[in-house]
Image (cartoon, helix red, strand yellow):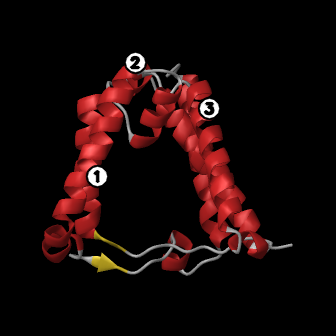
Amino acid sequence: MTLDHLHENNRLQLAIGLLIGLCFGVFLYIGGVTEYNVILGQLLLTDFTVVKVMLTAVLVGMIGIYLMLGRGLVELHPKPGSIGSTVVGGIIFGMGFAVLGYCPGTVAGAVGHGALDALFGGVTGILVGAGIFAAAYPALDEKILSRGVFRSMTIPDALKVNPWYVIIPFCILIAAVLAGLEYFGL
């Protein structure tokens, strides 16, 4: 069984995307990472809930994607990137995170549970920032975004190894970090 029939049905893809997005928001809420104080605690290195949730998501996602890839259910389509776009994106993300205390994902989750600061500050900031970026995109693309372009590849592709030679050590490392955080009560 493949997911080819799903690729041909755009409406079903949108419905599944909406459902997955809602579930993502609910899980962020359940995990506590839509709470301003939890995010602030992460930035102050006093509460590592955000790191635990993100590492768990990376662990589950990495294993799940490569299990599906191994069974021929999905294909990877890594996008090419550039140092310029990474730096600009990191600056924009960091500025928004520093000013509001939410990233785009946690803004959506916080709005979903009624946080007015996320609604007015976050959603407004996302819309204004997206508008400014769209207006500045032609000049940014010409002068900065296309600097240091690197081709699309995954870490296993870059290392030219079986993906599980990367996944298994990463899983062990993530599990060790999670166990360490729990051990030290962080």
Q: For this rendering, which residue is in front, 176 or 142?
A: 142
In the image: residue 48, left or right of residue 13: left
Measure how far apart labels 2 and 1 are at the Cα level: 26 Å
Q: Are marks 1 and 3 in contact (CB under 8 Å)?
A: no
Please tell me which of labels 2 and 1 falls first in the chain.
2
Measure how far apart labels 1 and 3 are at the Cα level: 25 Å
Instruction: Specify few, some or many for label 2: CA neighbours under 10 Å numbering under 14, 14-19, or 20 or more.
Output: few
Asked whether residue 172 appears in the rendered view, the answer is no
Say what secondary structure mark 2 lies in.
Answer: helix
Residue 37: give its label.
Answer: 2
Q: Are marks 2 and 1 in contact (CB under 8 Å)?
A: no
Asked whether residue 142 appears in the rendered view, the answer is yes
Residue drawn at (16%, 77%) of the image: 142
From the image, tell me which residue sits under label 3. Answer: 26
Measure how far apart labels 3 and 2 are at the Cα level: 18 Å
**Residue 21 place in picture, x, y as percent:** 59, 45
Residue drawn at (70%, 75%) of the image: 8
From the image, tell me which residue sits under label 1. Answer: 130
- Mark 3 vs mark 2, foreground winner is 3
| Amino acid on which the number 1 mark rests in the picture | Ala
* The image quarter in which residue 117 lies: top left
| Amino acid on which the number 3 mark rests in the picture | Val
Q: Which quarter shows the N terminus? A: bottom right
In the image: residue 20, left or right of residue 94: right
**Residue 98 place in picture, x, y as percent:** 25, 34
